[in-house]
């Protein structure tokens, strides 16, 4: 199994809503990532979890709250988002060994629209 | 982390080789070069990576200049399914910050 599964595929939410994005992998990877991608732009790193601990936070606003309940699961909790937060949110995983052969495996993403 | 620059778009005839350049003039000795591609509305897909030697796999070849300031991804026989945005990425050894370049939109034409 070389898949990273993200749910839901599409999400529409209001600015006062609370919602969560979910990501799951069963490759035994120990690092998991959230990226944000605006239309026609490259993905931008938001968070990295390594061995279930937050290792990178790229100065993301607190209305985005990541959670890594175990090494296979990654959540992104959303609260009080703004319309400019509308984007494709991508989850990725990697072995976590940090060495030469480290590669990212991406899910298909959640297309988020904030109204 | 090194920044990368790529041409915004390129065309290639079906069946011909596609050569996609990437400039990473500020790359450090311990930074790897990765290539990913993204087909519309899907997650990026790994293609190939290297440090200083040229690399080849079933998808592509990666040519890194001797000074490591630039690289070229080669798709030897492009097909219509290779139409995608191709991203050049540098990654620090033992780092987890994969920084995407601006990407090149490759259009393979029949």
Image (cartoon, coloured by chain):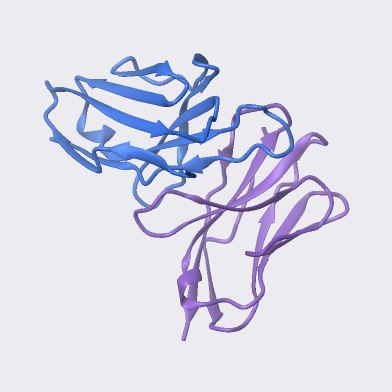
Chain colours: A blue, B purple
Q: Residue at x 24, y 38 (%)?
A: A8
Above or below A3: residue B66:
below
Q: Nearer the viewer, residue A31 or A71?
A: A71
User: Residue A74 at x, y = what percent?
Assistant: 39, 25
**Between A52 and A111, the one nearer to me in the picture:** A52
Q: Is residue A68 above or below residue B26?
A: above
Q: Quadrant of the C terminus of chain A?
A: top left
Q: How many marks?
A: 0
- Residue shown at 73%/56% (left/top)? B71
Residue A43 located left or right of residue A64: right
Query: Residue A91 appears in which quarter of the rendering?
Result: top left
Residues B45 and A29: in front is A29
> Residue A3 in the image: x percent, y percent?
44, 44
Please say if B91 is above or below B103: above
Q: Quarter of the image holding residue B17?
A: bottom right
Q: Position of residue A29 (x, y in %)?
A: 54, 30
Name the outermost residue toward the front: A1
Q: Is residue B42 above or below residue A5?
A: below
- Image coordinates of residue B74 in percent, x first then y, are 68, 67
Question: Is residue A96 found left or right of A67 in the rendered image?
Answer: right
Residue pictured at 66% horizontal, 41% vertical: B90
Q: Residue furthest right?
A: B66
User: Is B51 situated left or right of A84 in this image?
Assistant: right
Left of A99 or right of it: where is A29? left
């Amino acid at each position: 199994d070389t898949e990273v599964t993200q749910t839901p595929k599409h999400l529409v939410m209001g600015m006062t809503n609370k919602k969560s994005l979910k990501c799951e992998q069963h490759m035994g990877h120990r690092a998991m990532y959230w990226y944000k991608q605006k239309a026609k732009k490259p993905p931008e790193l938001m968070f990295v979890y390594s061995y279930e601990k937050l290792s990178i936070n790229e100065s993301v606003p607190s209305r985005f709250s990541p959670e890594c309940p175990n090494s296979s699961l990654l959540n992104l909790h959303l609260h009080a988002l703004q319309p400019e937060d509308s984007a494709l949110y991508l989850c990725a995983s990697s072995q976590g060994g940090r060495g030469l052969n480290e590669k990212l495996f991406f899910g298909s993403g959640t297309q988020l629209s904030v109204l | 982390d090194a920044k990368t620059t790529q041409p915004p778009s390129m065309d290639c005839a079906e069946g011909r080789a596609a050569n996609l350049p990437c400039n990473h003039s500020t790359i450090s000795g311990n930074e790897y070069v990765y290539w990913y591609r993204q087909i519309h509305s899907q997650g990026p897909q790994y293609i190939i990576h290297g440090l200083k030697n040229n690399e080849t796999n079933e998808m592509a070849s990666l040519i890194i200049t001797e000074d490591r300031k630039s690289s070229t991804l080669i798709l030897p026989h492009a097909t219509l399914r290779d139409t995608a945005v191709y991203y050049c990425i540098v990654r620090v050894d033992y780092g987890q910050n994969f920084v995407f370049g601006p990407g090149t939109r490759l259009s393979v034409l029949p």
